[in-house]
Amino acid sequence: AARLSVSVLELKPGMRVLDLCAAPGGKSMAAAMGMENQGEILSCDLHGGKLPQIAKAAARLGVNIVKTMENDGTVLREDFFGAFDAVIADVPCSGLGVIRKKPDIRYKDLTSMEALPAIQRQILQNAAAYVRPGGQLLYSTCTILKRENEAVIRQFLEENPDFRAEGLSLPEGLSEQETGMLTLYQGVHDCDGFFLCRMRKAP
């Protein structure tokens, strides 16, 4: 599911890409492969202690275009404005799509999840500011809850008319998605529950 989310981006060698909530680094590595290890990927995470995982994965795969940085995705950085061809925002979420792997999720305090959509919207809004004109923005979660997925996207698009969701060309077995939004379900697609949406900023 994570690899699929990056594959829907139209990544090319030489691009500059930001992975805003990157640890443990799977999407950054997938992006590097899509770019043929040419260009630049900045992999950020709130938890600096997780960054060595990303560097280790890059070294293992022979990827040398990934740089890491400790960064809070909810805090707007002016030095990132319009600086990236593509931004990946795999935001913190309730994780209900991976409950098969992490059954302890079912014991989470539900009240702690109520604040997630606000955090997700803030990270997405910041990520949008970092996309250059004509660039791409990927929003993804590992949950299947509409309030963390479609609802976040619809509000974002209403408030940011310079972005539009783009249809997705998907592998065999998955139908084309004209809305630009796709939800994968554990019992249907033989993978983790997952949501993704690709958007493009007006030139």
Image: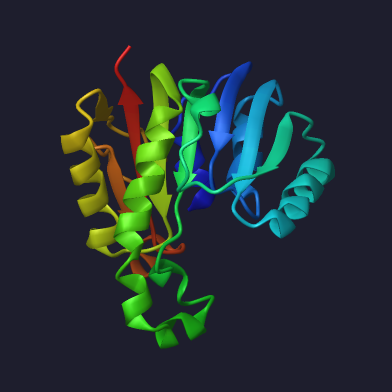
Question: Residue lying farthest top?
Answer: 203
Q: How is the image coloured?
A: rainbow
Q: Is residue 80 visible?
A: yes
- Residue 89 on image: x %, y %: 46, 44
Q: Is residue 172 visible?
A: no
The residue at 58%/44% (across/down) is 27
Foreground pick, 141 / 100: 141
- Residue 99 on image: x %, y %: 45, 76
Question: Residue lying farthest left?
Answer: 158
- Residue 71 on image: x %, y %: 60, 45
Foreground pick, 196 / 178: 196
Q: Is residue 113 left or right of residue 17?
A: left
- Residue 158 on image: x %, y %: 16, 36
The residue at 19%/35% (across/down) is 159
Q: Is residue 197 left or right of residue 37?
A: left
The residue at 31%/48% (across/down) is 182
The residue at 46%/62% (across/down) is 191
Q: Which quadrant of the figure contains the C terminus?
A: top left
Q: How many marks?
A: 0
Foreground pick, 78 / 200: 78
Q: Quadrant of residue 94?
A: bottom left
Q: Is residue 159 left or right of residue 172?
A: left
Q: Is residue 104 above or below residue 87?
A: below
Q: Quadrant of residue 201?
A: top left
Q: Is residue 141 above or below residue 5?
A: below
Q: Is residue 200 above or below residue 8?
A: above
